Image (spheres, rainbow, N blue to C red):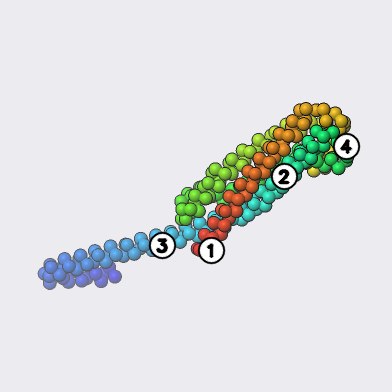
Amino acid sequence: MITFFRKIRQKLLSQNRVTRYLVYAIGEIILVVIGILIALQVNNWNEATKLKRQEIQLLKEMLTELRKQQQDFIFNINHHREAKEACEILLQALSNDQPYHDSLDIHFSRSYNFTILDNQQNAFAALKSKGITMIQNDSLRFLISEYYDVRMPFQIKIQEGSMKQGLEISQSHLGLFQNFAWNKSMEPWDFEELKKNRAYLSWLSFTADNRGFEMENFQTTLKRNSALIASITEELNQK
């Protein structure tokens, strides 16, 4: 092709047709420019297609992680609800001078419930490494950033404090029960003495409120999780 164009230019010059040569030369330049633009457009299209495939794959991976995390949130909510209810039952029994009954033993155990958050963020970490602008939908990109950069760190901080507090307080209460074990019945050494133990009664009251606070926060995080799942699902359906 290049040889063909070269022959035409040489023929026009040999015939002393300068004007026609210039017109041809300009036309040839235009064709070259058009070819370059087409090549660039094809390259841009290929790159855009590649990025779109990567975006879809990351969103699918994120969706899988979010759904698994959703089940963990539900478990956490139920666990904190059990602890809150156990503390309230024990507080009522001790404060109202009720007689001991072994049905209370499971509540002694559940009052120490705390949870460890399943915090899988592999898909989000991969997204950040590639650049979050890979997500084309502005609204979805905002939801992802808000969930992983704001909501989850806050929830994690609450859980870390709860776990530390739970481990510390359980160690200080070891002497109050014959058998200290989570999710199993725990019988107190002296039920009547527990009624007089102001520190223990105050702990029950505090823990009931604290577990309620954690439960509400998990419910809020679960709502954000569900909203993000819905948005990602809608985005994938449109691609």
For discs 4 and 2, the disc positioned in front in the rendered view:
4
For marks 2 and 1 on the same chain, the one whose residue lies earlier in the sequence: 2
For marks 4 and 1 on the same chain, the one whose residue lies earlier in the sequence: 4
Q: Residue at x 79, y 40 (%)?
A: 89
Under mark 1, the amino acid is Asn
Q: Quick check: marks 4 and 3 in contact, CB under 8 Å? A: no
Q: Quick check: marks 4 and 2 in contact, CB under 8 Å? A: no
Disc 3 marks which residue? 45
User: In this image, 49 relative to 93: left or right?
Assistant: left
For discs 4 and 3, the disc positioned in front in the rendered view:
4
Q: Quick check: marks 4 and 1 in contact, CB under 8 Å? A: no
Q: Measure how far apart labels 4 and 3 are at the Cα level.
A: 75 Å
Circle 2: is it few (<14), some (14-19), or many (20+) Cα within 10 Å?
many
User: 114 or 39: nearer the eye?
Assistant: 114
Circle 3: is it few (<14), some (14-19), or many (20+) Cα within 10 Å?
few
- Percent across and percent down for residue 97 are 84, 33
Q: Measure how far apart labels 3 and 2 are at the Cα level.
A: 53 Å
- Percent across and percent down for residue 201 are 77, 31
Disc 1 marks which residue? 237
Under mark 2, the amino acid is Arg
Which label number is shown at residue 81?
Answer: 2
Circle 1: is it few (<14), some (14-19), or many (20+) Cα within 10 Å?
few
User: In this image, 47 relative to 97: left or right?
Assistant: left
For discs 3 and 2, the disc positioned in front in the rendered view:
2
Disc 4 marks which residue? 100
Q: What element carries label 3?
A: helix
For marks 4 and 2 on the same chain, the one whose residue lies earlier in the sequence: 2
Q: Is residue 199 above or below residue 27?
A: above
Q: Residue at x 65, y 35 (%)?
A: 161
Q: In this view, does 99 lie above or below 10?
A: above
For discs 2 and 1, the disc positioned in front in the rendered view:
2
User: In this image, 109 relative to 59: left or right?
Assistant: right
